Image (cartoon, grey):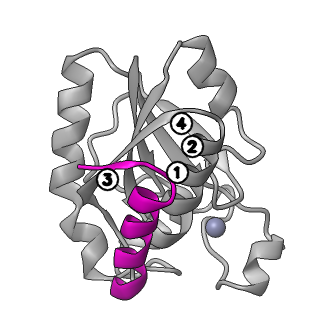
Amino acid sequence: MKALLVIDMLKDFIDDEGTLSVGSVGKQIIPCINKKIHEFREKGYPIIFMCDNHEKDDKEFEMFAPHCIAGTHGCEIIDSIDFNQGDKIIKKRRYSSFFGTDLDLYLREKEIDEIYLTGVCTNICVLYTAASARNLGYKVGVFEDCVASFDEKAHCFALKEMKDTLGCEIL
Ligand SMILES: [Zn+2]
């Protein structure tokens, strides 16, 4: 069975006034992600929203400006993504969607062995989620028009790395 992951399509990353906005590329992928959400939903496949959700003094803020702090406006899913009440939300504190989260157990219980990635940033949370998933034996697809990064070069590198080194399918 398949599942769609929508990674970090949150106000602090996507809105212009977000504290760690990725820029216009973040908004450009919204229609493509919504299209995939509809396709997966129609087939009855789960949609999983992976949501960055940090402590106020999270160690990650030694590297990045504070963002997606639990309980703030910034950690909410953006309004223009077609989120449904029946969709799964999993909070995370690190780049990999698998690190310290319920994701692996959730997928195994639903007998999901193929995951398809969308969201931001291609070279950070998408890439490290792909790496974890491949290490755990999942089949991984990445929808190229549904991922983006503030760093175009790193975006391209990450797509190549996911394809050539991790064995993901770039779609
Ligand atoms: Zn973060």
Main secondary structure along the magenta-highlighted residues: helix
Query: The disc labelled 4 sits on which kind of residue?
Result: Ile
Query: The disc labelled 3 sits on which kind of residue?
Result: Asp
Query: Which circle's residue, 2 or 4, is located before the other in the chain?
Result: 4
Query: Which circle's residue, 3 or 4, is located before the other in the chain?
Result: 3
Q: Residue at x 39, y 83 (%)?
A: 150
Instruction: Name the residue at the front extreme.
Output: 164
Q: Give the side of residue 137 with respect to residue 29, left or right.
A: right
Q: Are marks 3 and 4 in contact (CB under 8 Å)?
A: no
Q: Residues within 10 Å of mark 3 (few under 14, many from 20)?
A: few
> Which residue is more in the foreground, 160 or 61?
160
Where residue 11 sits, quadrant-wise, is bottom left
Which one is in front in this view, the residue at disc 3 or the one at disc 1?
A: 1
Q: Is residue 20 above or below residue 26?
A: below
Which one is in front in this view, the residue at disc 2 or the one at disc 3?
A: 2
Give the residue number, with chain letter if any, for mark 4.
89
Cα–Cα gap, marks 3 and 1: 26 Å
Residue 158 visible somewhere in the drawing: yes
Q: Is residue 133 above or below residue 149?
A: above
Picture coordinates of residue 165 (x, y %)? 50, 60
Give the residue number, with chain letter if any, for mark 3.
79
Secondary structure beneath dot 4 equals strand
Give the residue number, with chain letter if any, for mark 1.
130
Q: Give the side of residue 41 with respect to residue 161, left or right.
A: left
* Residue range (magenta): 152-171
Which one is in front in this view, the residue at disc 2 or the one at disc 4?
A: 2
Which one is in front in this view, the residue at disc 1 or the one at disc 4?
A: 1
Query: The disc labelled 1 sits on which kind of residue?
Result: Ala
Q: Mark on residue 134?
A: 2
Query: Which circle's residue, 2 or 3, is located before the other in the chain?
Result: 3
